[in-house]
Amino acid sequence: MSPHNGSDEKARPGFSFLVCPDSRLLRSRITEQLAVFPPATGPWERHVYWGDEEPPPRFWEQLSLQGLFGASRLLLIRQAQLWPAAIWKKLSQALARPSSQCWPFFCLEVNWEKGQPKIPAHIAKLRCMAFADQRGWIWRHEGLTERCVRRHVQQRARELELNFEADALEQFCASVPPDAQAIENELQKLALLRGSGDPDGGGKITAAMTATAAWSPECNVFACIRHMEAGNLAAAWRELARSRDSDSLLFSLLALLARELRLLWQIRAGERVRLHPSEAGLKKQLALRLGPRGLAEGMALVADAEWQVKSGRRTPEQTLEFLAARLTLLFGPSQP
């Protein structure tokens, strides 16, 4: 296996591994790397793939293709740890000679235990991993924990030119979850709140301001599903509009919708399922009203939404709007 350019220690990595469970931290790292190593010609040509699907032939072409006037290609592989051993074995062989026109980022979005990432053994033992480790092409970050939330908040506050009072900083760090996207959203809200006028605060973020902007989930996905099932499209859209990360929200919503539809199918089939007493009656009514045809249509909508995004035919924002409208119409009490 040969490096991208062994004669230049500052050369761009031939490929990169990003080991981190936090999607916003992953995006920030990629942005930083692209700023350090700009493309040789023109802008980066971006291509996104997901580990829950087998890479198509086009992926292998983009990974290895060399051309005299070829565009600089950025390959982003999300949830790459989901690819099976056979694909990773083929991938390791392909990476033995990285293309100068292609920069693959393999996102291993795994949880950490006792300070170590839980990388599947068939990936951890690969030659490409060992080689990347030697070259410093692996970035590891366990995500935000309660221990490092304060440091992260202080760093982002400096970058956003937010000056916290001591009590306000303590209150803010104690109230937000260890999630980079949630923290970013709250800091952006505080920046807007400060900009709207603060004659007594001297431009600082006060405890009163952090109290009004205390964290709550951007979008309550469960509430969104309840609004859809009740046929209340306006409420569902209001809930969805609270999120700034449509990508993350969409796939969380799809996973929960798939689980909900499977549950309703089990109820309709007469299987014994565990339900909260407050929801049992409503779930049974919904399952009976939808029937096999309606439940099958709901499952098809969920599967199609995922395909539309991953194939690039729709953006996550477009898919969220379309899915909310179709499922609310399907679930709504007015439906047969």
Image (tube, rainbow, N blue to C red):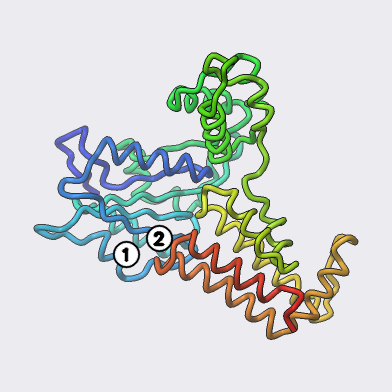
Q: Are marks 1 and 2 in contact (CB under 8 Å)?
A: yes
Mark 1 or 2 closer to N-term? Answer: 2
Q: Residue at x 60, y 32 (%)?
A: 145
Q: Residue 44, how many percent across, how many down?
A: 25, 51
CA–CA distance in space, label 1 to label 2? 8 Å
Q: Residue at x 23, y 41 (%)?
A: 38
Asked if residue 96 lies left or right of residue 173, the reply is left
Residue designated by label 1: 59
- Mark 2 crowd level (few <14, some 14–19, many ≥20, 10 Å Cα): some
Residue 42 vs 224, above or below: the answer is above
Residue farthest toward the left in the current orientation of the protein = 68
Q: Residue 91, how many percent across, how many down?
A: 34, 59
Image quadrant in which the C terminus is located: bottom right
Give the amino acid type for the residue marked by disc 2 in the picture: Tyr
Give the amino acid type for the residue marked by disc 1 in the picture: Phe
Q: Kindly indicate the quadrant of the structure image that contains residue 310.
A: bottom left
Residue designated by label 2: 49
Q: Kindly indicate the quadrant of the structure image that contains residue 321.
A: bottom right
Asked if residue 149 lies left or right of residue 270, the reply is left
